[in-house]
Image (cartoon, rainbow, N blue to C red):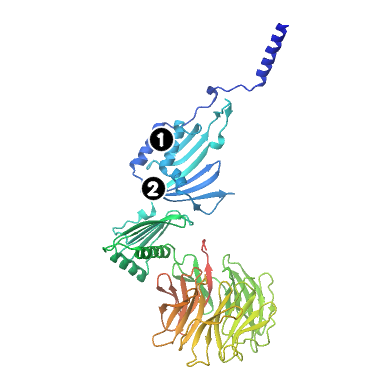
C-alpha cells in the first residue's frame, strides 16, 4: 500500500517536471559585444581636452518611442536652447520646444556617459554596442545599441529588444562664433526656448552693423539697423551703466546685455526702454528681408518680376500679343489672368502652366479687374465704341457670366475693391464723367446695387481708390468735399454697410489719397499732397490709436501696395516705381521709367516657405 503510493507520487513529480520549461542558466545568455572601455575613455578625454563648451549638436535617435531629431545649443557649458522634431510616416514634423532638462540628456557629455555605462554594463540591460567616434573631437557620430536577453524575476529569459536604440550626431561650432570681430556689442540678446523654439542670438555693434544667428535653422544675417533706432540705442547706452538681465518670456528665457558707458543705474523706466528696444531690434534684424517675395509689374506691355531680396528685376518668359490690356492675380498669389489683343489668358505662377478663358469678340476686349476668394475673376468687356459690360469667369467655368448692371454703369470708375470674404465689390465714381459720383456696393451674383456714398449723404462728393479691410468689415477711401472751402480731398473710413462714416484726415487743403491697408489691418497708409507748404508726405493712420504718423516725405508720391510681409511700401513718383523699407527707413528703386512709359504694378509672387 505505501509502496504503491510512493511510486504514484514519484511518477506525478516526474510528469510535472517534464511539463515545466527548464530554467536557463547564466551561461546560456550571450556575452555583450562592446568596444574596449579604453577606447571610450580615450574619446571622452579627447572631447574634454578640446574644451568644447560652446557648440550646437544635432542628434537623430531611433528608439521604441519613435524617430526623433534633437537640436541642442550649448553655450559656456550650459544648455541654452533646444528643440525637437518627430518623424511621422516618413515626414519630419514642425519643430517644437524641448525643455532644457530633457535636452541635457542629448549634450555630447551626456551621450558619452550613456555609451560608457552601456559598455560597462551599468545600464538597465546589457547591450551590444557599436560606436564610431569623430577622429578629431571625440564625440560619437554613430551609435548602434542592441539590448540583450536578461532574466526576469521568475528566473526565465526575457528579451529586451525594445530597450535598444541607435543614433547619429553632428557637432558644429555656434554660428555666432564663426563671425570674428574685435568690437564689443552695444546690444546682445539671446533667446532660449519659447513658442518658436528659439535658438538665436543678436549682436549690434558700435559701427552700425549687426549679426543675427539661429543655430537651429542655421541662419546668419548681417543687416544694418535703421539710423534712428541705432541712434536711440547709442543714446540709451551713453546715459546708463551696463544692463545685464534675464527674463522669462513666452515660455522661454531671454537674456539682454546693454553695454552702457554712463554712470546712472537704470531705473524701472529705463529698463523697460532697454527691453522694448532689444525686442524691436531682435524682431527687425532677425529676418531675411524680402526673401521669397517678388513684385510683378508691367512695362510697355511686358511682364517683369522684381526680386525684393536681391533687388533685381527680370523679364518674365511670357508671350503676349500687343497691346496688353490688363492683369490680375488671385488672392492666393498663384494664378495670373491677363488680357491681350487676342484672348483672355491664365497663367499658374507656381508651375508655369498656361491656358485660355476665351477669345475676344471682334469689336471688344476684356479688362481683368480682380479676383475674389470664390475664384471669380471680375471683368469688363470694353467695346471699341459704346459702354462697357460687366461680368465674371473662373477656371472651373471659363465662360462669360454677365453681371446685370444698369446699361452704361460706371463707364469711367475711379477705383474698385473686392470684398475679401464675399462675392461683392465696391466701385467708386468721381470726376466729371459720372452723373452720380459716390461709392456703390455691387453683388456679383445678381448685379444688385446699393449706394453707400452719394451726393445726398455727402453733398457734391467724389470718391476715389476704395480699399476693403483684410477682415471685410471696413472700407477706406479718398473723398473730395466740394461744398467745403478749398475743396480738400480727405481719407474717410466707414463700415462695410455704410455706417460710421469717419474722417481720418482733417486737411483743409490738398489731396489725401491712395489709401492701402496693412496686412493685419492695424494701419492705413496714404499720400497727402499739397496740404500746405512742404507737406508732401506719406502717412500711416493707426486704427487702434486713431493717430496719424509721418512715414516719409516726398512730392508726387502715391502708395500702390504693401508686400505680403508688410515690409515694403510700393509707391509711384513721376514715371518711377520705388519701394520704402518700413522696418529700416530705406528707399529702394524698383524701376526707372522714361518719359511717356506705362509702368503698372500687377501683384506679388510670394514663395516663402513660412508665411
Which quarter of the figure has residue 3?
top right
Q: Is residue 300 in view?
A: yes
Q: Nearer the viewer, residue 145 or 493?
A: 493
Q: Is residue 359 visible?
A: no
- Mark 2 to mark 1 CA distance (whole Å): 23 Å
* Residues packed near mark 1 inside 10 Å, few (<14), some (14 to 19) or many (20 plus): many
Element class at badge 1: helix
Frontmost of labels 2 and 1 is 2
Residue at numbered disc 1: 40
| Residue wearing tag 2 | 78
Helix, strand or loop at mark 2: strand
Name, please, the residue furthest toward the front: 268
Residue 373, position as x, y percentages in the image: 62, 70
Q: Which of the two discs, 2 and 1, labels the residue nearer the N terminus?
A: 1
The residue lying toward the viewer, choosing from 223 and 309, is: 223
In front of the other: 391 or 95:
95
In this rendered view, identify the residue nearer to me: 245 or 18.
Answer: 245
Q: Is residue 281 above or below residue 455?
A: above
523 left or right of 159?
left
* Residue that appears at 64% across and 77% down: 424
Residue 220 percent across, percent down from the top left: 40, 58
> On the rendered image, what quadrant is the N terminus found in?
top right
- Numbered badge on residue 406: none
| Position in image of residue 282 (x %, y %) | 41, 62
Amino acid at each position: 500500500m505505501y509502496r504503491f503510493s510512493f511510486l504514484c507520487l514519484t511518477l506525478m513529480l516526474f510528469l510535472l517536471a517534464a511539463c515545466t520549461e527548464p530554467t536557463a542558466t547564466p551561461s546560456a545568455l550571450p556575452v555583450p559585444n562592446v568596444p574596449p572601455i579604453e577606447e571610450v575613455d580615450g574619446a571622452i578625454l579627447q572631447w574634454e581636452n578640446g574644451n568644447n563648451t560652446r557648440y550646437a549638436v544635432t542628434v537623430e535617435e531611433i528608439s521604441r518611442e519613435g524617430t526623433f531629431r534633437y537640436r541642442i545649443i550649448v553655450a559656456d557649458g550650459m544648455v541654452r536652447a533646444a528643440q525637437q522634431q518627430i518623424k511621422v510616416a516618413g515626414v519630419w514634423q514642425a519643430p517644437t520646444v524641448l525643455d532644457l532638462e530633457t535636452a541635457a540628456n542629448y549634450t555630447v557629455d551626456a551621450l558619452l556617459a550613456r555609451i560608457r555605462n552601456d559598455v560597462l554594463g551599468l545600464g538597465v540591460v546589457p547591450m551590444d554596442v557599436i560606436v564610431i567616434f569623430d577622429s578629431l573631437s571625440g564625440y560619437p557620430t554613430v551609435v548602434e545599441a542592441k539590448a540583450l536577453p536578461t532574466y526576469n524575476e521568475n528566473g526565465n529569459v526575457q528579451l529586451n529588444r525594445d530597450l535598444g536604440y541607435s543614433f547619429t550626431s553632428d557637432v558644429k561650432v555656434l554660428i555666432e562664433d564663426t563671425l570674428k570681430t574685435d568690437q564689443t556689442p552695444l546690444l546682445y540678446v539671446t533667446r532660449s526656448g519659447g513658442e518658436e523654439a528659439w535658438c538665436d542670438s543678436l549682436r549690434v555693434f558700435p559701427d552700425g552693423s549687426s549679426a543675427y544667428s539661429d543655430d537651429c535653422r542655421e541662419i546668419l544675417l548681417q543687416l544694418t539697423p535703421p539710423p534712428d533706432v541705432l541712434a536711440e540705442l547709442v543714446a540709451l547706452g551713453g546715459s546708463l551703466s551696463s544692463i545685464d538681465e534675464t527674463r522669462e518670456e513666452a515660455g522661454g528665457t531671454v537674456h539682454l546685455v546693454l553695454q552702457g558707458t554712463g554712470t546712472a543705474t537704470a531705473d524701472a523706466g529705463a529698463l523697460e526702454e532697454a527691453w522694448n528696444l532689444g525686442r524691436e531690434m531682435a524682431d527687425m534684424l532677425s529676418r531675411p528681408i524680402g526673401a521669397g517675395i517678388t513684385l510683378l509689374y508691367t512695362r510697355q506691355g511686358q511682364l517683369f518680376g522684381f526680386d525684393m531680396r536681391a533687388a533685381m528685376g527680370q523679364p518674365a518668359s511670357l508671350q503676349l500679343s500687343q497691346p496688353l490690356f490688363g492683369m490680375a492675380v488671385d488672392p492666393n498669389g498663384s494664378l495670373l489672368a491677363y488680357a491681350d489683343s487676342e484672348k483672355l489668358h491664365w497663367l499658374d505662377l507656381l508651375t508655369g502652366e498656361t491656358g485660355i478663358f476665351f477669345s475676344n469678340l471682334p469689336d471688344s476686349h476684356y479688362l481683368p479687374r480682380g479676383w475674389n476668394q470664390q475664384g471669380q475673376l471680375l471683368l469688363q468687356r470694353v467695346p471699341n465704341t459704346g459702354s462697357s459690360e460687366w461680368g465674371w469667369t473662373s477656371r472651373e467655368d471659363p465662360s462669360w457670366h454677365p453681371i446685370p448692371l444698369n446699361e452704361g454703369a460706371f463707364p469711367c470708375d475711379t477705383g474698385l475693391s473686392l470684398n475679401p470674404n464675399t462675392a461683392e465689390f465696391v466701385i467708386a465714381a468721381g470726376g466729371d464723367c459720372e452723373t452720380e459720383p459716390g461709392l456703390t456696393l455691387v453683388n456679383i451674383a445678381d448685379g444688385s446695387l446699393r449706394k453707400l456714398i452719394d451726393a445726398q449723404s455727402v453733398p457734391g462728393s467724389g470718391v476715389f481708390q476704395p480699399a476693403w479691410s483684410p477682415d471685410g468689415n471696413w472700407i477706406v477711401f479718398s473723398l473730395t468735399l466740394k461744398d467745403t472751402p478749398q475743396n480738400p480731398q480727405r481719407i474717410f473710413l466707414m463700415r462695410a454697410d455704410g455706417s460710421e462714416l469717419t474722417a481720418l484726415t482733417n486737411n483743409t487743403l490738398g489731396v489725401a489719397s491712395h489709401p492701402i491697408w496693412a496686412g493685419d489691418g492695424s494701419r492705413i497708409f496714404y499720400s497727402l499732397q499739397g496740404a500746405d507748404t512742404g507737406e508732401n508726405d506719406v502717412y500711416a493712420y493707426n486704427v487702434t490709436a486713431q493717430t496719424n504718423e509721418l512715414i516719409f516725405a516726398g512730392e508726387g508720391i502715391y502708395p500702390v501696395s504693401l508686400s505680403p510681409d508688410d515690409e515694403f511700401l510700393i509707391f509711384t513718383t513721376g514715371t518711377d516705381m520705388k519701394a520704402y523699407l518700413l522696418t529700416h527707413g530705406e528707399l529702394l528703386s524698383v524701376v526707372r521709367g522714361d518719359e511717356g512709359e506705362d509702368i503698372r504694378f500687377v501683384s506679388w509672387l510670394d514663395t516663402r516657405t513660412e508665411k
